[in-house]
Image (cartoon, rainbow, N blue to C red):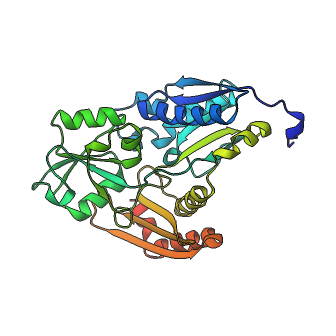
Amino acid sequence: MVTDAKCQQTPTKIKIATRKSKLALWQANFVKSLLEKKYSDITVELIGVVTEGDQQSTIPLADVGGKALFVKALQNALLSNEADIAVHSMKDMSVFPTEKLMIAAICERADARDAFVSNDYSEIESLPLNAIVGTASPRRSCLLQSIRPDVRIALLRGNVDTRVAKLDAKRFDAIILAAAGLHRLDLSSRIQSYLSDDIFIPAIGQGAIAIECRESDAQLQERLSFLHHDITAQCVKAERMINQIMGGDCHSAIGAHAKIIKNKMHIAAMVGSVDGKIILREQAECEVNDAVQCAETVAKNLLSQGAEKLLRA
């Protein structure tokens, strides 16, 4: 049964479920400040949640359940009415909907690119032979080794500040991180160079923030609508469509990035082997209204090139 928004009481207090990492709290406080600025009649409270992904910080995500580990506990807080909304990194969200929940808003995207972070080297090409680079991402491993096959990949997990601290402890020659997270935590000065989103294609949804709530909370959805950035949402929808068709998961070296330039949507996607020896790429340009069909074509073209074999390897 669909709940009539007019029959619901307008919320005067909104509880936000969030992870406790510095980046997650930044994102939750960002949403909190926008809500409080927009609505003088509400109070907003943060509900800190420890997720399984935070607890399993020394094991590859693919071995313990993938990015869903960062999301499930927040969704449970919504389903149990402990919280009203959850703030997620869009790239952690499954492409398949969760029953009784919905993405109510996608905030304007920050920088979607990956960043090269090092204390001694300015870019990937300047790394010494057999340099050690930290990442936990199959996509980053693939793209990095396609440029520098000699590089040794070492597992790097943990929050942004933890990863930077490991670099400072001389455990790595360099690390690859999302530029958006570094910007949000005032760590932009640690970036040596940015990796082109046309070549080093970002993760699906990277740089965007998703706000999730219960499907039944129509009044709350109405209040959240001002946070929704339509251009970002259209781009993210195209990226997620590619992944949904291809069936990529946390084991997959897969990336997709859509951007709108002069009223045209440009989509680039890749699938590769984790060692970087094989990379399939596809790109397309289309009218924004045709983005879904364009994304479907990109995905099907990659599959026709043999992407499924790489995804299942």
Mark yes or no: residue 31 visible: yes
Query: Percent position (x, y) of residue 138?
Result: 35, 53
Query: Percent position (x, y) of residue 224?
Result: 69, 41
Q: Residue at x 85, y 43 (%)?
A: 2
The answer to which of 118 and 142 lies nearer the viewer is 118
Image label count: 0
Q: Quadrant of residue 238?
A: bottom right
The answer to which of 249 and 292 lies nearer the viewer is 292
Q: Is residue 255 above or below residue 20?
A: below
Mark yes or no: residue 312 visible: no
Position of 6 with respect to 168 (left or right) is right
Q: Residue at x 45, y 68 (%)?
A: 268
Q: Residue at x 50, y 71 (%)?
A: 266
The answer to which of 133 and 224 lies nearer the viewer is 224
Q: Quadrant of residue 306?
A: bottom left
Query: Percent position (x, y) of residue 207?
Result: 46, 49
Q: Residue at x 46, y 62 (%)?
A: 256
Of the 4 image quadrants, the one containing the C terminus is bottom left
Position of 140 with respect to 261 (left or right) is left
The answer to which of 133 and 306 lies nearer the viewer is 133
Of the 4 image quadrants, the one containing the N terminus is top right
Query: Percent position (x, y) of residue 89?
Result: 50, 43
Q: Quadrant of residue 223?
A: top right
